[in-house]
Every structure is written in structure tokens, then in C-alpha cells.
Amino acid sequence: MNIETQIKLTSQLKKQRVILLGLVGVFAISNLLLAASLLTADKAVLIMPTHISKEFEISSKKVSEDYLELMARDFVQSFLNMTPDTQEYLNSYVLRLAHPSYHGELKQQLNELFEEIKNKQMTLHFTLNEMDVDQDKLVVKASGYLVKHMGVREVERKLRKYHIAFLNNGTRLMLKEFYEVEDEKETTN
């Protein structure tokens, strides 16, 4: 009986070794395949612009206030700083920031502004002074001076306030409204 038990145990050990060696072989082959795929895969590097010093969060339910402010600032600075030569670039850039349902109206605003700029051969420059961010409504009120130049001469400088509203699609904010807000002091007088 002792010999029979040893033969059974030896047989079981051989089966276990074969199974173990088979598993080791499968793992070795899978590791080689994984290493090969990592070496040949196209790598993507996430680059952070130097002026971004905070983390931003966006989900289908929440957008960080800093991200909302940054998007509004970028839009306002792009839309309200123009020369007669920047129309093509601004049309494509600004429209990329906007929700497709707003493209028509935004393009019309851009074209009207560019028409005035080209006819008068002037440039626009907006200096941002203040931003009021409503994180829940995805709305930003931006105020500052809109300055018009003809050549090197400043012809107009007015304090303006703009309403910028966004839609959240879960991965990024898209512009849905942009218009100038009438000053409440002027409308009550």
C-alpha cells in the first residue's frame, strides 16, 4: 500500500507540475505580447500649458469654477481682440468653442463685428477687469474696457459687461450664449 500511495502521489505531482508549467508558459507568452505591444504602441503625452496652475474637473454633473472662468476668459479674449486681418482665424477658432446650435448666431455676430472693423480700419482690444462666475448655471459675467483703435490713435474706450453661457456635454464646455449686458444704472435712469 505504501508503494501504491507513493505512485498515486507521484502521478498527482507530475500532473500538477505539467499544469503549473503550462500556466507559467501562458503567463510568459502573455507578458512578452504585452511588452511588445507597449514598445510598438503610439504614445500620447498630456501637455499642460504653463499658465494653468490648478486642477480642473468636468463631469456630466459638475464643472469646476476655475475651468468655467478660464473658458469664459479665453472666449472673451479671443472674440473681442481683433484686427481686420484676424477674421479667418477667429471664425474657425471661436466656432470650435461654440455649440453647433449657436454657430449661426455667433457667425453673424462675428461677421457684423468684422464688417465694422474692416470698413473703419480699426482694431478692438478688450481689457478684462472682473468676472462673476455662476458655477451652477454655467454663466459668467465678464466686464472690462473695450478699446477701439484707428491706427495708433485710441478712438473709444467704454466699460462693457458681457454675458457668456455654456453647455456641459460631460467632457467639455461649449458656448451657448454671448451678448453684451446693458448697464443696470443706464437702464434705470
Image (cartoon, helix red, strand yellow):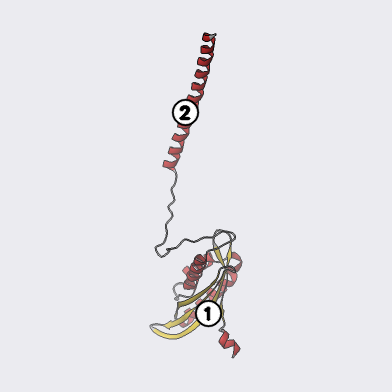
Q: Please tell me whether residue 61 is drawn above or below residue 185 in the rendered image.
A: above
The CA distance from mark 2 to mark 1 is: 69 Å
In the foreground, 98 or 9: 9
- Percent coordinates x, y for residue 108 in the rendering: 57, 74
In what element is the residue under mark 2?
helix
Q: Please tell me whether residue 162 is drawn above or below residue 37 in the rendered image.
A: below
Residue annotated with mark 1 = 161
Residue kind at label 2, given as amino acid type:
Val
- Percent coordinates x, y for residue 43 in the rendering: 43, 48
- Percent coordinates x, y for residue 60 in the rendering: 59, 59
Q: Please tell me whether residue 59 is drawn above or below residue 25 in the rendered image.
A: below
Q: Nearer the viewer, mark 2 or mark 1?
A: 2
Considering only order in the chain, which callout, 1 or 2, is on the residue closer to the N terminus? 2
Residue kind at label 1, given as amino acid type:
Lys
Residue annotated with mark 2 = 24
In the image as oriented, which residue stretches furthest toward the right? 101
